[in-house]
Image (cartoon, grey):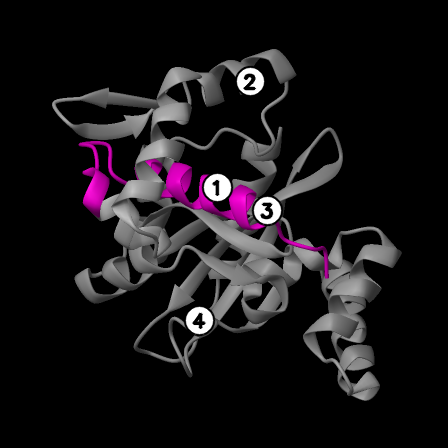
Amino acid sequence: MRNHHRTVDRVAALLEAAARRPGGSTLSSLARRVGAPVSSVQKVVDGLVATGYLDERDRRYTLGPAPWMLAARAGVPPVPAVPHDALDHLARVTGLPVLLAARIGDDAVYLDWAGADESFDVALSARVRAPLPDTAAGRVLLAHLPPEERKRIALHAHEGDPAAAAALLETCARIREAGGERGASGTLLPGAAAVAVPLRREGRVTGALSAAAPHAGEVPAGVAQALADAADAWSG
């Protein structure tokens, strides 16, 4: 497990909170999000506005232009660009919620989704992060990490239980061989099933595409192939 830094974690949480609300967040709502006093959050937010990472209008804060400039300077987006309309179309084709995920640290983070009912949408909005081993999309991302990273994350996820860590690594090997994962959706939908496939950029796995069966408990036949076809097209 990589060490966290309190200030860095707070800045990251503020940026994520601002990004989730295109209409802007108040200072008090940002403070509640990070669990800190308004007075201390004000200082951090002022610094982020001054450097362009947040923007302020009418006392509401939105994501500023700086993150986009950094991404543009990097030249290559970390995840293949998938328009929301394309996700929405795939959700209609499969009849299931479809989610786009990427790895940030040791977590899988849902960047976008379509086809979710109201309760699932609320659950996703409230918790867009989950440890990599905990979701089908996360396990796909974990499976394609370098061996030392896989081992580190597996041992941390099952600290004190090497047999469980070894079983997780075996699951990763199976995912690489099969080209995707079919298993538990995750803690957001206990008991639900999901399928997930990798998204690639220049041959490297940088994202995952998944579909979940929130109510049926079983993913219909053909969904995995539909996801794989879409992933191949978007990866290209």
Residue under numbered circle 2: 70
Amino acid of disc 1? Ala
Residue count near mark 2 (Cα–Cα under 10 Å), binned few <14, some 14–19, many ≥20: few
40 vs 221, nearest the viewer:
40
Magenta highlight range: 1-28
Badge 2 element: helix
Q: Earlier in the sequence, mark 3 or mark 1?
A: 1
Instruction: Report, in whole angstroms, how far the alpha carbon at label 4 lies from the one at label 2.
Output: 39 Å
Q: Earlier in the sequence, mark 4 or mark 3?
A: 3
For residue 219, the mark is: 4
Amino acid of disc 4? Val
Residue under numbered circle 1: 12
Q: Is residue 18 visible?
A: yes
Compared to residue 215, the image places residue 16 above or below, namely: above
Residue 97 percent coordinates (x, y): 34, 57
Q: Nearer the viewer, mark 4 or mark 1?
A: 1
Amino acid of disc 3? Ile
**Left or right for 195, reference 19:** right
Q: Nearer the viewer, mark 2 or mark 1?
A: 1
Residue under numbered circle 3: 104
Q: Earlier in the sequence, mark 4 or mark 2?
A: 2
Quadrant hosting residue 78: top right
**Left or right for 132, reference 51:** right
Compared to residue 164, the image places residue 48 above or below, namely: above
